[in-house]
Image: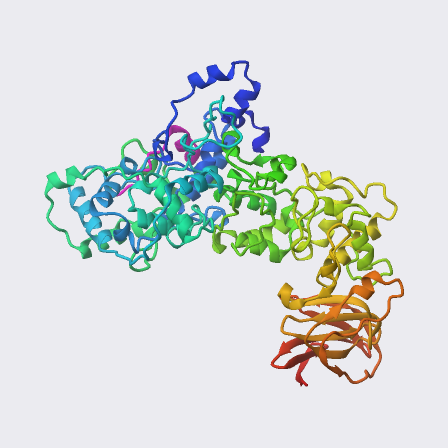
Amino acid sequence: MPFALRASSFLRHSSFVLRHCALPFALLSLIAPPAHAHPLQAEPINHAYVFNFDQFNLPEDPDEHVTEGGYLLLAELNCTQCHKAPEAWSERLAPKDGPILSGVGSRLDADQLWLFIRSPQFLKKGTQMPGLFAGEEGDAEKVEALTEYLSSLKQDKPQMPAGDGAHGKELYHKIGCVACHEPGTDFRPEKVPASMEVEKPGNASVPIAFADVYDVNSLAYFLKDPLAHRPSGRMPDLHLTDQEAADIAAYLHVGRQQAPASERKALKIKSQGVEKGRELFLSMGCSNCHTADRKAVSKVSKELASLNTANGCLSAKQKTGTPRFDLNDLQKRALKLAIAAIKKGEAPQFTAQQKVDWQMTRLNCYACHDRDGKGGPEDPRAQYFTSNDGSAESLGELAHLPPRLDNTGRKLTRGWLEKILFGEGGSVRPYMNTRMPNFGRKQTEMLVSLLPEADKREKPIEIDVSGLAKHHRAEAGRKLIGMTGLACVGCHGLKDRKSLGPPVIRLTNTIDRLQPEYFKELLLNPQATQPGTMMPPMFMGRKSADKDVESIWTYLKEIQGQPLPDGLISTEDFELKPAKDGKPVIFRSFIEGAGTHAIAVGFPEGVNAVFDSVQARWTTLWKGRFLDAMSNWQSREMLPIKPLGKDVKEMPASTGKREFSGYRLSKEGVPTMLYTLDGKNVEDTLKPSGKGFEHSVTINGKTTKEEIQW
């Protein structure tokens, strides 16, 4: 059942209490838990903490709901590393990779390793690392052997810069860390009045006790690239610079004196040897989750469907070697219910939507994003999400909260989804302080295929993006979005120009970013397509809506070769400069030697070409400057434009019957012209090569290439 509809879970949010309880705020602050100054002083968690289990499950929830939480625990606690799931459940319950231990001896000293191995919950409250020792005969020697082995695993680390703790505190509270981790009361959110208490999160936070156990350089190195140490993506990469990582480390590392392993010293255990520790690491199943100095094959004990939940991990009394997770009663109930359900037979067939929800739950995407009424930061955490541009404040929550993910699969192109999910850029909200993290390709690549299937529209939207229809003129689209048209530039910027009003997403990357069907769907009915948007319904009831939207798409498709709209344009904008833009510029107009339906392509490498779409052939090549579009954009006569460069080369006349059908852009922005030659399909591409072009022509699948030098 969606989170937004479940009152039992919603009551976990203190913001709900403030909005719906008659008690005054001052009284509520008196009965709230005592405040803490630093994130490391957060209220301890005395059970294995899985954020989205605790967030969405309560003891009073019905068994059906808690069972779903049990599946989450089976996967996130890595139960299926040791207990093989039935084939039908293997994808859903796939375990996650544990931390890589190849350099753990450089991160933790021997005493801290000994304490953590002996009793993980003692050193890190809330950890998902289970204890393996119950105080039986021989345990002390095994703990010592494992300590010696792991201490031997060293790894050189670069020296990180000296950190600025004050700046680190600001970064920690602004870039998104507090979506999962505890905020400190030593930082006051900008929008909370001085007379008010800062509201404390209702949900517990992912523990960060090791921030002070590592030395500060190791902590900074970890924060810079967490996926190198924890490839599961549960601690994502926030794209920190070396200095930013060092600053946050300086803030989090308060320099407490670590408790010595006094029991270890008192036992006076003789050295056990590294090799014995390595053997125990394998035989006790540590290598099922962790990679150390070599990859080991997972050792599977009883299969999941054959487990007796009265014994083993879920029993009241555990033997040495049986993982002890310090589960609470609700977690034990959930696990028992889930295992019982799995024993009954085949797993249900999960829809793409359910698979998306499952992976987003596992990665804790719901800490920041709302999708279909589930998730989003609770109010006490949302107050730390801010904007760096005061003019964005008129956008309300859209200025600082991460976007809702409804319909994302039909909204974004595959290429843009990959950019965002794989940490390769894609941010279009520079006014937002929060950063979109990288969870690792392995954890997110399935979403690239699942999201489009999950968000597919029942009745497809039809849009003509060929640019061939008479109304599909870029100039018509330019006028529509300008201040003398629909005034889109009042909110949206283009290229290097800011909007005339609040800094809404710039339209420059629209064609690369949005699927055309979604673009039209959004413009025709903004609120239904993207609930909560501030986009006005400019096209509702407009008789020319279809052709107007398609004309705007044509303009944005050809934006590199078009003037800016009224309101953004200046007199310096008329010469087209591919080298400045860094990618090919495509300009359709009346061009000398190629007629009224010419398509000019200027390349940053300083070579240019014109394609005549009537004759379906390349007509002219030249070097140097591209085109000056002033006469085209400003003159009523529409005189043909002449090349600005030098070394103009005329291409041979065409032969055969040709019919142009459009062009396709590569990721680099290079167009491939599409036409038929005597009924055969042709793909025709010019790419800069040496002092000229490589000319590639594919006819019915067979490709020929030639070099054109002049």
Q: Is residue 75 in the magenta section? A: no
Q: Nearer the viewer, residue 587 or 98?
A: 587
Marker count (numbered)? 0
> Residue at point 84% right, 71% down?
640
Q: Nearer the viewer, residue 65 or 439?
A: 439
Q: Is 18 situated above or below 523?
A: above
Compared across the picture, whether 278 is left or right of 505 comes to left
Q: Nearer the viewer, residue 639 or 407?
A: 639
**Residue 20 makes an appearance in the image:** yes
Residue 247: x percent and y percent?
Answer: 39, 45
- Which quarter of the figure is the C terminus placed in? bottom right
Q: Nearer the viewer, residue 328 or 602?
A: 602
> Residue at point 82% right, 65% down?
632
Quadrant of res 575: bottom right
Residue 106: x percent and y percent?
Answer: 26, 53
- Which quarter of the figure is the N terminus placed in? top right
**Residue 78 makes an appearance in the image:** no
Compared across the picture, whether 484 is left or right of 145 comes to right
Residue 322: x percent and y percent?
Answer: 28, 41
Q: Is residue 335 in the magenta section? A: yes
Quadrant of res 654: bottom right
Q: Is 292 situated above or below 78?
A: below
Compared across the picture, whether 283 is left or right of 160 comes to left
Residue range highlighted in magenta: 321-336
Q: Is 431 situated above or below 515?
A: above
Q: How is the image coloured?
A: rainbow
Residue 578: x percent and y percent?
Answer: 66, 67
> Residue at point 15% right, 37% down?
263
Extreme right residue here?
637
